[in-house]
Amino acid sequence: MSALQRIRADFAGKRIAILGLGREGLALARLFSSLGFLLLLSDDRPLEELPQEVRQFGDLGAQIKCGGLSLEALKCDSCFVSPGIPLSHPVVARVATRGIELWNEPRFFLRYCPAETVIGVTGSSGKSTTASLIAAALRGTGRRVYLGGNIGRPLVGELAHLQAEDAVVLELSSFQLQLFKESPKVAVITNIAPNHLDRHADMAEYIAAKANVFRHQREGGAVVLNADQEVSRQLAACAPGTVSWFSCFGSVPSGAWLKGDELVLADGTPLCRASELKLRGQHNLANALAAAAACDLVGVPPEAIARGLTSFTGLPHRLELVECIDGVSWYNDSIATTPERSIAAMHAFNEPILLLAGGRDKHLPWEAWAEEAKEHALGVVAFGEAGDMIAALLRARAVPVQRVRGLRDAVHLARNLAPPGCVVLLSPGCASYDEFRDFEDRGEAFRALVRSLRT
Ligand code: ADP
C-alpha cells in the first residue's frame, strides 16, 4: 500500500483537528484536505493575520475557528498540534485527557514515510548544521535526499512522491519529539545543554523528550551520541539498538573522532582534515563528526562523507560573514538564542571580538557566558530586554560593556567602537521576540543595518 492509501485506511471516518496554522499545520491541512477528510482548523491568531490559504480550506468544507484555540477539538478523533503550542495549553490539555490522540507533523510523517533510510537529528545546538552536513554527504552518493522537519520544511507534502530508496534527514526539536511514539531508524543527538526550560517542566523532561529520537527504535536501529558529554554518554544505557559515538577529544569504539587535525572513522579510515571544513569553530568539528558517524551507519562511503563535509559552506544566520568594512568583519549568528550558543560562537574566533548580546532572556544561566566574554571579548554591547541583566553581570567582572536600547543602536555603537582587525559578532544569547518576529527577522535586520554602514 502507498503512504496515502495507508493514511486513508488508518484515518477513515475520523474528524481531524489541526491546532496552529503555521508551516506545519498548513502542510497537514493541504494533505488531509486533498484526501477529503473532515477538518477543524484553529489558531490563536485572528483569521486576518493568517495566510489567505486558510480561507480556501473553509471554502472546501473545513471548519475554521481562529482568534483562540477551539474547544471543538474535543469533538475530533485525532488532534495535530503545532510545535509553537505548549502541550500545557488548556485546550490541548483537555484534548489529551479525553484520550484523543495527539500528533504533530514530523511524528505523522515518520509513521507513513516509505523511505528506508531515515535519519532523525536532534540536540540542543547544531541540529540544522549536522542535518545539512548529513544531507550533503548523502546527496554525493547520487540518492534522492529529502532534508526537512524543524529546519523549516515540513515533509508531509512529499509523502506522495517518496520512494523506498530515497533518503530522509529529519531535524527534530524537543517540542516535536515530546509526542513521538516511534523513532527514526538512525538517530543523532548532537549535544544536550539547558535550553527551552521555559517550555519544559525541567531538565529531566527536556532530556526525556530528546531521548524519544531513539527510545522507540526497533531491531536494526542505531543512535549517534556525543562521547564528550557526560549527560549524552548516560543516554547510551537506554538505547534499544546500536550506539555509535563521536568525539573531538579521543578515540571511539564506533563512529567518528578527531585524530590530531584529521577527522577519522572509528576504524582509522581518514575522512578529511579539520582545516578543509568550510565551517568555523570547534563546535562545527563536533557537528561534522556527528554527521560522519551517522553517514557511516547508513553505508555512505568514506570518500562521499568527506566530500559532503568539505563542500558544505554553512547556513544563514549561523556565524555568517555579512561584510568586512574598514578591516572589521561583521558576523551574523542570530540563531544563537541561548548563552551556550553564544559561548560556542566566541570560541570560533581567534580575532578580538566585540560582541552584541541581548534580546529576550529565556531564564537560562548566564554566569559561564559572562566568564567566557571576559576571556574572549574585548567588549560587549548589550541591548534589548535582557540588556540590563547582561550589563550587570559583565560589570561585576570588569568586562567593558555598554547598554543600548535595540539592535540598531547596538550596530551603530559597534561601528564606532570596533578597531580594525576585530570581529563584530551578533551572537545574542537571547530570543528575539522583544524586538523581532523571530531569529531570522533579527538576522536579516542585522544584515541590512551592517550593509547600510557602507553608504
Ligand atoms: P540548531 O539547528 O540546533 O538550532 P544550528 O546548526 O542551526 O543549530 O546552529 C546554531 C548555532 O548554535 C550556531 O551558530 C552555533 O552558535 C551553535 N552551535 C552549533 N553547533 C553547536 C555545537 N555542536 N555545540 C555548541 N554550539 C553549537
Image (cartoon, rainbow, N blue to C red):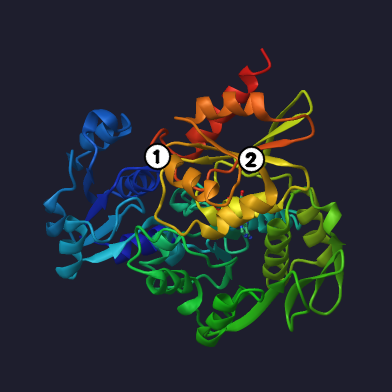
Query: Is label 2 in a helix, a strand or a loop?
Result: strand
Left or right of 394? Residue 58 is: left
Q: Nearer the viewer, residue 263 or 22?
A: 263
The amino acid type of the residue labelled 2 equals: Gly
Measured in 3D between alpha carbons, the distance from the residue under mark 1 to the one under mark 2, in whole angstroms, is 19 Å
Q: Nearer the viewer, residue 186 or 174?
A: 174
- The x, y position of residue 252, in whole percent, is 74, 80
- The x, y position of residue 360, in whole percent, is 41, 43
Quadrant of the rendered structure where residue 448 is? top right
Give the quadrant of the N terminus: bottom left
Would you place residue 329 above or below residue 94 in this image?
A: above
- The residue lying at 50 percent from left, 30 percent from top is 407
Give the quadrant of the C terminus: top right
- Per the image, the residue denoted by label 2 is 379
**Which is in the foreground here, disc 1 or disc 2?**
2
Q: Nearer the viewer, residue 12 or 428?
A: 428
The answer to whether one can see residue 347 in this image is: yes
Query: Is label 1 in a helix, a strand or a loop?
Result: loop
Left or right of 368? Residue 296 is: right
The amino acid type of the residue labelled 1 equals: Glu
Q: Quadrant of ligand 1?
A: bottom right
Would you place residue 226 above or below residue 37 in this image?
A: below
Left or right of 202? Residue 43 is: left
- Per the image, the residue denoted by label 1 is 385
